[in-house]
Image (cartoon, rainbow, N blue to C red):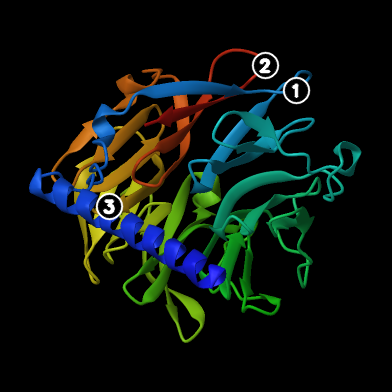
Amino acid sequence: MNNIVKNNKIRIKHITYVLISLSFIIQSCSNGSSPIQPQPPKDPRTYTWTADTLYLVGNAQTLMRRIWGSSPKDVYAVGWADRNGPMWHYDGNKWTFVKLNPLDGGLVSGFIGLWSIYGFSANDIYAVGQNSDHSSAMIHFDGSNWKRVSLPSVGGLLTSIYGTSSNSVWAGGVNTLYHFNGTKWQRDSVLVSIPLNSFFQFTSFAKYNTGLYAVGFTIINNGLSENHYFFKQINSNFSAIDSAINTARSDYGLVLWGSPEGNLYGGDIGISKYNGSTWTNILQANNPIIDIYGTSDNNIFVTGNRVVYHYNGKDWKDITGKLSNNRTSLYTGVWTNGTEAFIVEQPLTGWPQKTVIWHGK
């Protein structure tokens, strides 16, 4: 009997709590209150920019080139350091150099310089570059450690890496092209006629609609000019569908970016947009473009020699003055998630040479 009474009291208390909760909800609704709505993203042109300098004592050069992040609290910058520090990581509070070398506690033996980085998640990231003998170097992060990737044959310096998924990754560079099929890396052919005493170099990959495209160049005329190539993946091979000598300047240039909406952009002395058959110039610049990245056709950052641009889908704006306004710098890389942005600056003056990372939000 006592247990029955006790259980009834518990039920009465529970019902009373539910009724009070319902009364509170009804009262809130009757007062016209509503759930807090998420705020729209801040206009990137109104970002407040702060600067962090990357430098290790004893280095003559700490020059980062490219940048990629899984989130604004997990960002990597890669490049060149004459002694140590070719990779740095931002955790949302500060930048620290990544301890790759075994002497620092890492697992990547030997010298390594890094040119490009690309990932699919915080636990699946690739970076590529060169060893001390300028041969291909590739490392992978599995969420715990950076380790060297065993490549099937010795290739040249790798300058670009990109993937449509973690099961289809491409890495290209000097006379070299590799592909990962989800199981293993394989060496692929470079289908370009390379002049005697010259070389070919892949510089960028990007997805456009359902296809994969690439750009690169070879030195011609005894080093006096370059021949730029625009490739499309056809039957698993990258076939050149256009080429241009740089004295006339190619529309696609040496860097590509594909938007989530399915558009393709190329950077040279300006920015052009591809419609599947022709290129249309949408920005005329005075200096070479080095990197393109964005979150949509209405939010694109472009970095280059002495300049940074932003595109909002309607017009281009030179935002260099929002940063350092240093017209003697190279702005070599950019990454954004739509709410924050990171831009890599290499000042061309001063010694030792250091890297500045601009963080806008």
Q: Residues within 10 Å of mark 2 (few under 14, many from 20)?
A: few
Tell me if label 1 and label 2 are in contact, CB under 8 Å: yes
Please give the residue where the numbered disc 3 appears in the rendered image.
20
Judge whether 12 appears above or below 182 on screen. Answer: above
Q: Secondary structure at mark 1?
A: loop
Of the pair 178 and 359, the residue shown nearer to us = 359
Of the pair 74 and 307, the residue shown nearer to us = 74
Determine the residue positioned at 16% across, 53% down: 26
Q: Secondary structure at mark 3?
A: helix
Please give the residue where the numbered disc 1 appears in the rendered image.
59
Mark 2 or 3, closer to the camera: 3
Please give the residue where the numbered disc 2 appears in the rendered image.
352
Quadrant where the image shows the C terminus: top left
Q: CA distance from mark 2 to mark 3?
A: 68 Å
Q: Residues within 10 Å of mark 3 (few under 14, many from 20)?
A: few
Lateral position of residue 291 relative to residue 24, left or right = right
Measured from the top left, where is residue 85 in percent x and y? 73, 34
